[in-house]
Image: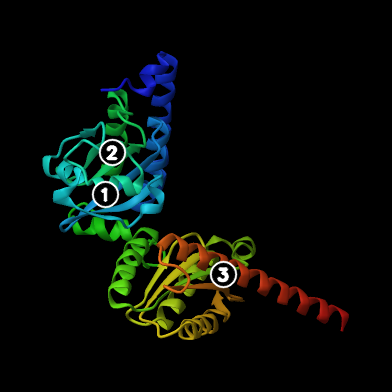
Amino acid sequence: MAKSRMTAIGSTESTNAVLLEIIEAQTEVVKLALDLIGVMNFVVERVQKLTRANGAVVELAEGEDMVYRAGSGIAASQLGLRLKSRESMSGLCVASNKILYCRDSESDPRVDLEACRQVGLRSMLVMPLRHREQAVGVLKVMAPTVDAFGTEDMRVMELMSGMIAGAMFQAAQYETNDLYIRATRDMLTGLPNRALFYDRLRQALVLAQREAALLSILNLDLDQFKPINDKYGHLAGDAALKEAAMRINNTSRQSDTVARVGGDEFAVILPGVRSRGDAWRMVERIQEAVDQPFQFGGHWIDLRVSIGMSLYPEDGQEMTTLIDLADRSMYSAKQARKGATSALVSQTSQA
């Protein structure tokens, strides 16, 4: 096994620094309390840093699949990626409930080689995540080079995986199925989170390709959200997010997926649209529904949203391409609305 990075540094001082970071991480995890997806996202970012990996991921066992539910570095864009448990090292780790190490994915028969190449890794360290003594997922670090990890990295993984296991126990003390809900739902709005959105989008794109159908992605961002928090407080900001989520969800079709993918950012998957015009009509309906004041704490508060759209396969066939285009379209819409608002204010002041 390769010499670990911490050992290569070769100093007690560096080891103490790592232990201090782990203690600080434990403090942050306590602050996140029952927010399981928040804990998972925090841990993958921190374990990537501590092991000097190029990426880290939490995969949960769901039926016959292992699914990427949190990721950082080279794994961040792979949220929702599904691997067959019986064909992957992650699945073997869950089945054996033991830590596994792949020195070189190109020669290791235990790995899903195609998935390794897709992510861009050559070596990985895979640690089981246990809930009520049962392995229900893995914490994994990865690197694009051969034999990149060592014994000290394993110790770091053990400590960090324990933090996730503790969060799992607190979030779902009795039912393993609760872990899926905690890991895939936004706690404030109840909508699917970014991980589940990516998962469903991957599946929707496969289905659209198979059926030669159109599919649209919407990216939505609340306008002037920060002033709501500043003027009326964070409870009002939370109320604005929940109100927007309800309006978007109520306007969408049963076949659509509405998700909260960021602080004040939402996304919608529209499968089976008939044309670009059909998708834009959905944009207009959502815009009309959201762009209405709501009442909170005796105040009427303005609520507005900017929306961008992309269409498969006309705008691209890759998921990242379509998401980026919808994002750019949203920012163009936001700038256009800012310009229109500024012009209206100017005309009003001149009058």
Q: Is residue 261 left or right of residue 307?
A: left
Residue 217: % across, % down: 44, 71
Disc number at residue 329?
A: 3
Q: Residue at x 55, y 78 (%)?
A: 294
* Camera-nearest residue between 234 and 243: 243
- Separation (CA) of disc 3 from disc 2: 39 Å
First in sequence: mark 3 or mark 2? 2
Q: Quadrant of residue 102?
A: top left
Q: Nearer the viewer, mark 3 or mark 1?
A: 1
Instruction: Tell me the kind of residue under disc 2.
Output: Ser
Instruction: Tell me the kind of residue under disc 3.
Output: Ser
Instruction: Tell me the kind of residue under disc 1.
Output: Glu
**Mark 2 surroundings: few (<14), some (14-19) or many (≥20) residues within 10 A:** many
* Camera-nearest residue between 200 and 226: 200
Residue 214: % across, % down: 38, 78
First in sequence: mark 3 or mark 1? 1
Q: Residue at x 28, y 61 (%)?
A: 181
Q: Quadrant of the N terminus?
A: top left
**Mark 1 surroundings: few (<14), some (14-19) or many (≥20) residues within 10 A:** few
Residue 319: % across, % down: 41, 63
Q: Quadrant of the C terminus?
A: bottom right
Q: Is residue 234 above or below residue 204?
A: above
Task: Identify the secondary structure beneath mark 2.
Answer: helix
First in sequence: mark 1 or mark 2? 1
Q: Is residue 266 above or below residue 125?
A: below
Which residue is at the far right? 350
Q: Does residue 33 show up?
A: no
Q: Nearer the viewer, mark 3 or mark 2?
A: 3
Disc number at residue 114?
A: 1
- Separation (CA) of disc 3 from disc 1: 33 Å
Residue 202: % across, % down: 33, 64
Q: Nearer the viewer, mark 1 or mark 2?
A: 1
